[in-house]
Image (cartoon, grey):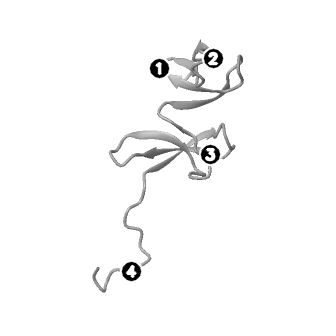
Amino acid sequence: MSDNCPYDIELHRPYIDAVTIKCPKCGKEVIIKKTKKGRKYYGCEANPDCDFMSWQKPSAKKCPHCGGYMLEKGNKLVCADEQCGYVEAREKKDED
């Protein structure tokens, strides 16, 4: 490094964007992160203490059958537990 560069500078800053959803495992915030290849995913801000990770956007709504968290897939809400298999239509938000 050159002498003009401070040593406490952060050279590689990860892509982080906040989502207004709580982590289903620990209750902290869920944030959007990027992999090294640039693919976006949803993860807990308490990583590595909490191992929550999802490729689909998690929903704040809980599954009525098993009580687990649900994922937004297109215009549907799908239970994250594949064995449960609960699916429902997502409510449309009125945007004026």
The secondary element bearing badge 1 is classed as loop
Would you name the residue on which mark 4 appears? 6
Side (left or right) of 25 relative to 17: right
Residue 56, image x, y percentages: 49, 30
Contact between marks 3 and 2 (CB within 8 A): the answer is: no
Side (left or right) of 38 relative to 42: left
**Among all residues in the image, which is located at the extreme left?**
2
Instruction: Tell me which residue sits at (60%, 23%) in the image.
Output: 81
Would you name the residue on which mark 3 appears? 29
Would you name the residue on which mark 2 appears? 84
Quadrant where the N terminus sits is bottom left
The secondary element bearing badge 4 is classed as loop
Between marks 2 and 4, how big is the CA–CA gap? 53 Å
Residue 39: image quadrant is top left
Instruction: Tell me which residue sits at (46%, 39%) in the image.
Output: 41
Between marks 3 and 4, how big is the CA–CA gap? 32 Å
Residue 73, image x, y percentages: 49, 22
Q: Is residue 96 visible?
A: no
**Which mark lies nearer to you, 2 or 4?**
2
The secondary element bearing badge 2 is classed as loop
Instruction: Tell me which residue sits at (42%, 68%) in the image.
Output: 10
Rendered image: mark on residue 14: none
> For the residue marked with disc 1, what is the amino acid?
Gly
> For the residue marked with disc 3, what is the amino acid?
Glu
Residue 79: image quadrant is top right
Q: Vertical placement of 37 versus 83: above or below?
A: below
Instruction: Tell me which residue sits at (69%, 43%) in the image.
Output: 27
Disc nearer the start of the sequence (3/2): 3
Would you name the residue on which mark 1 appears? 74
